[in-house]
Image (spheres, rainbow, N blue to C red):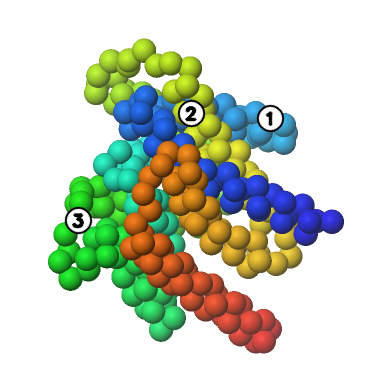
Amino acid sequence: MNERYALGYGMAAVLLWSTVATAFKITLDYFTPIQMVVAASVVSAAALTGIAYWQGKLHLLGRTFAARPFYYLCLGLINPFAYYVVLFKAYELLPASQAQPLNYSWAITLTLMAAVFLGQKIRKQDWAACALGYLGVIVIATKGDVLALQFESPTGVALALLSTLLWAMYWILNTKNQADPVLGVLLGFLVSLPLSISLSLYSGEWPSIPWQGWLAVSYVGLFEMGITFVLWISALKLTQNTAKISNLIFISPFISLMLLATIIGEEIHPSTLVGLVLIVCGLVIQQIKGKSTQKSMADNT
């Protein structure tokens, strides 16, 4: 029964994450990137507060923050503040069909950063994964004209890749976090909100936004930043086969491209599909390496 629930939660999370690239583009028609961060963060913080209350953990929030205030301040500055400001700006400058696969390469970036900051060894499989992944990035960014290295929006590409560094850095810092994951993410939103609100006010006045804009940004706050995270964590906790659930994430970018073409009519360049396949192949190689490592560890115990 637990495996059935785990699969259900995992599929729900993947399907919801598949919709957010489309939601980002729709929401950016109404908000600037920093305004979008503020509004989505408020929605997400409210949703996570409700979840923590329902789980009976909300009373631990103050104690959790008081134990490591500087740590949670750093986490909140990286994610959601810096990460989403950079990511939303990348989506503003690039077609979503390019920004989403570029951001998807964050797991490959994580491998390199883990070697630097955590002292983890990079094996041959990891180098192959990195080579395939970043070849895919170049194919997408240049629309297939790899030798010319001509980028439609160099700033957008740079920001999309910077978002992978920020997200990888966030997860590296999270390896030191022993607190409840829902409380940890909620604290990130709460400590970052004053800064994001201040920046949005400094950047200019908020325009009059129709209900469609508020609906779109609420969707982003709920299903990119909030509820979907809890679904994914629940799936990983319930399953006895983490690899099976983790592999579901490979479906997401392809569904996302289909939705972008269908809902907002973005043209999906063949080079985007080629590049995305290269990135996913790199990620699959990492998964195979992880399984073999786990097997060898099991054999030694």
Decide if residue 222 is in sight here.
yes
- From this view, report whether residue 84 is shown above or below residue 153: above
If the image is split into quadrants, where does the C terminus sit?
A: bottom right
Q: How many angstroms separate mark 1 from mark 2 (CA)?
A: 25 Å
Residue lying furthest top: 208
Q: Earlier in the sequence, mark 1 or mark 2?
A: 1
Residue at 57% x, 26% y is 46
Q: Earlier in the sequence, mark 3 or mark 2?
A: 3
Instruction: Depth check: give the residue in front, 184 or 248.
Output: 248
Q: Residues within 10 Å of mark 1 (few under 14, many from 20)?
A: few
Q: Would you name the residue on which mark 3 appears? A: 151
For the image, the number of numbered tags is: 3
In the image, 258: left or right of 199?
right
Kind of residue at disc 1? Tyr
Q: Residues within 10 Å of mark 2 (few under 14, many from 20)?
A: many
Q: Which numbered disc covers residue 216?
A: 2
Instruction: Answer with the quarter of the image where residue 199 lies.
Output: top left
Residue at 39% x, 79% y is 128
Mark 2 lies on a secondary structure that is: helix
Mark 3 lies on a secondary structure that is: loop
Residue at 65% x, 47% y is 12
Kind of residue at disc 2? Ala
Kind of residue at disc 3? Phe
Decide if residue 67 is in sight here.
no
Q: Position of residue 219 (x, y in %)?
A: 53, 32
Instruction: Answer with the quarter of the image where residue 91 lies.
Output: top left
Instruction: Depth check: give the residue in front, 70 or 154.
Output: 154
Q: Are marks 1 and 2 in contact (CB under 8 Å)?
A: no
Q: Would you name the residue on which mark 1 appears? A: 53
Q: Earlier in the sequence, mark 3 or mark 1?
A: 1
